[in-house]
Image (tube, rainbow, N blue to C red):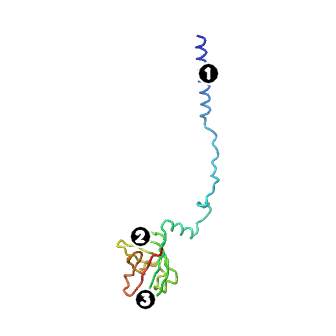
Amino acid sequence: MKSSLAIVATVLLCAGISAVGLSIWALPQRAERMAADPIVLGTIPPASHAPSALAARLHAASVSPPALFSVSNFTRKTVCLVERGAALTSRSRDFFAPPDCEEVWPGLARATTWTQHADGSVTISDPGGATLLTLVRGRHFSYEVTDNPGADLALLMLP
């Protein structure tokens, strides 16, 4: 009987010590001060960095890659390169033609918007929304002018 009493007393003592230990362990710990991760990645600019216009254009290009076209005027025998840029809306994209494109087609250097229509035709317009050219899809990666019967223009997408 003495040995049973000793076993019960030992079990109760161990249970009490365990209960005290668990209650101390479960107490809220002192919160560690939150610190920023010391790893700096080049892909994420610091918060003080204001993105440049070039960075914004590169970001837009990654979302909607630009396409380069050669514009050929077969009557004048002139050629220039233009860029269909990033998406502005679901149907329109940014458009850029350098000043030397004035020799290819008058007013083309003022063009700022490329708008794709449901029928597959494309309108190239200036900042005021005036249509400069209307194009239809030709063979493969080319477009041809349709709105001006005297114009012998073609746009060919470059790889």
Residue 11 versus residue 141 in the image, above or below: above
Residue 124 location (% of width, % of height): 43, 78
What amino acid type is highlighted by mark number 2? Arg
Residue 9 location (% of width, % of height): 60, 17
Marks 3 and 1 sit apart, C-alpha to C-alpha, by 105 Å
What amino acid type is highlighted by mark number 3? Thr
**Element carrying mark 1:** helix
Q: Give the mark nearest the N terminus, 3 or 1.
A: 1
Q: Which of the labelled discs sits on residue 91, or is there none?
A: 2
Q: Which of the labelled discs sits on residue 2, or is there none?
A: none
> How would you rate the neighbour count of disc 2 (Cα within 10 Å): few for under 14, some for 14-19, many for 20 or more?
few
Q: Nearest the camera: 81 or 124?
A: 81
Q: Nearest the camera: 120 or 131?
A: 120
Q: Which of the labelled discs sits on residue 13, or is there none?
A: 1
**Element carrying mark 2:** loop
Q: Closer to the observer: label 3 or label 1?
A: 3
| Residue at (42, 83) in percent of width and height | 153
Q: Give the mark nearest the N terminus, 1 or 2.
A: 1
